[in-house]
Image: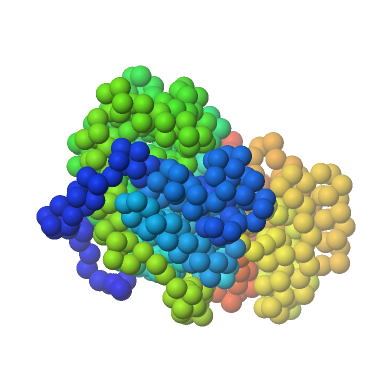
Amino acid sequence: MATAGTAYAAPAGPARDVRDRLRGLIARMSLEEKVGQLFVMRVYGHSATAPDPADVEANRKEIGVANAAELIAKYHVGGIIYFSWAHNTRNPRQIADLSNGIQQAGAAQRVPVPLLIATDQEHGIVTRIGAPATLFPGAMALAAGGSREDVETVGRISGAELYAMGIRQDYAPTADVNVNPANPVIGVRSFGADPQAVARFVAAEVKGYQAAGVAATAKHFPGHGDTDTDSHIGIPYIHHSAEEWERLDAPPFKAAIAAGIDSIMTAHIVVPAFDKSEDPATLSRPILTGILRERLGYDGVVVTDSLGMEGVRKKYGDDRVPVLALKAGVDQLLNPPDLEAAYKGVLTAVGNGELSEREIDEKLLRILVLKERRGLFAGPYTSRRAVDRTVGTKRHLRTADKIADRTTTLLVNEGGLLPLSRRSARRVLVVGADPAAPSGTGGPPTGVLARTLGELGFTATAHSTGTAPTQAQTDAAVAALADHDAVVVATYNVTAASSQRGLVRALLDSGKPVVQLAIRNPYDIAQLDGVKAALASYSWTDVELRAAARVIAGRREPKGRLPVPVMRADAPGTELFPIGHGLSY
């Protein structure tokens, strides 16, 4: 396996004899088998053949099969995507067993083809596989740390752990440049607002994942960073001109392509500058073929974002969306809400000549080349031994903590309030938001912070007030503060209308020292007048909260620097803190 300092070049295309062998494999397939290979599908259950009864029922209701093995036998799908909510990810050994069961089902087909098993292990706020796997800071936190070597290390270690569990495709890194603070769906999933910095970090993470044998996936093309609409529930518009796109959105995707990325995910966004039809990019031939394939020269696998999202379903039916995506330039069709309708829709399109079988063959060849490159034809299986020696090792966990220690950003520290002194502020109250933790990443945030501060010599008490504290909850927090020397308040995406502002104001009015920690987007401080000590952790996962607590306690220096500007609330065109801002002790 390559190390962090290994020189990297884009992977060479497979030898001619390999392509010829893969073409021979395609020639043995029926049209139904070829079309099935283009789909990547969810399936409920911890086992490929014996999921729990409730998962069998969910599979029959949504897909018309009982389990993963039946799904593969009926539809010949080429990939499976793991979700925690689909009960695919109980623990690393179980995940490896599930992966092996899926590969056994693939090998049992009339024309045996290994499956490309994928998941969204971005780390930070999008994490599908939790502890005891190693959990790292997310993209914006890593960018705050500023180290490309750290980012590559995250990809390499995370990739090694995914590989050990039988997962050979990760839908990461996020290549979107988050230039819109109101972005509801990207935010801290992005490496930041500087296109060139994002490009460098994207390339580093691609290098790490693919050195570990896992296909990286840059998302969401052509760039989802400047929108205030969530494509899960609506159709976002990106109003960048062609020149703005070239400057703001293109650099990370160009860097990913130059790094030899295996796959790129589309965005369900409308970009009128590139497609006057106002079709989402996932269905846009001018964007996917005209720009991605022809202008940027990308010939790897193109995968859609989930076809169950409203951003791609509003305009066309579930039987037409996959056909239009394939015509636009897509290869893999991810997670259609109605697999039967999608599958039959593609078969019908080939039957009536709207799509040619030759086009299907070309798309399938790209997918099979990726599977060959990631070793699936030579060795599709994993083992519990591989899991035990790789996943969540002490060395990996120590590395995650060391990387996290470089990410916490100190924004404000008037009067040297931080670090907190165990002599003058031994009794610490931890209040604030306790959003549900990303899958398997611990929590609640106030509890993690209090527990860590306790381990560092403070007497700390957790007191959750939620993301929308009522007046009664605020009053109770202020009353609890009377028995403490200082308070740490965890804030979560504070807006002008947020009742979190009233909580912070009431805490400040108590006269006790107040430390504010933004546990998601770092923009909260702009809404919180009077705060004298403010930090950003960029996520509320345990690994980042523990790192923030170590900074608050003075056990670590704050080393993070803002990867995005924080604008003034009363003058949105004026920077309160620029990119690169960050204080030290």
Position of the N terminus, as image quadrant, is bottom left
Position of the C terminus, as image quadrant, is bottom right
Left or right relative to 379: residue 101: right
The residue positioned farthest toward the left in the image shown: 16
At horizontal 84% and vertical 44% (from top left) the residue drawn is 471
At horizontal 21% and vertical 58% (from top left) the residue drawn is 10
At horizontal 29% and vertical 48% (from top left) the residue drawn is 367
User: In this view of the protein, which residue sits in the foreground, 98 or 487?
Assistant: 98
The residue positioned farthest toward the front in the image shown: 110
Q: Does residue 479 appear anywhere in the picture?
A: yes
Left or right relative to 472: residue 119: left
- Looking at the image, residue 142 lies above or below residue 564: below
Residue 575, x across and y down, in percent? 48, 43
Left or right relative to 336: residue 513: right
Q: Quadrant of residue 116?
A: bottom left
Colour scheme of the picture: rainbow
Q: Does residue 568 appear anywhere in the picture?
A: no
Residue 371, x across and y down, in percent? 30, 56
The residue positioned farthest toward the top in the image shown: 277
Residue 115, x across and y down, in percent? 38, 55
Residue 231, x across and y down, in percent? 50, 34
Q: Tally the marks.
A: 0
At horizontal 78% and vertical 46% (from top left) the residue drawn is 469
Left or right relative to 406: residue 210: left
- Looking at the image, residue 385 lies above or below residue 406: below
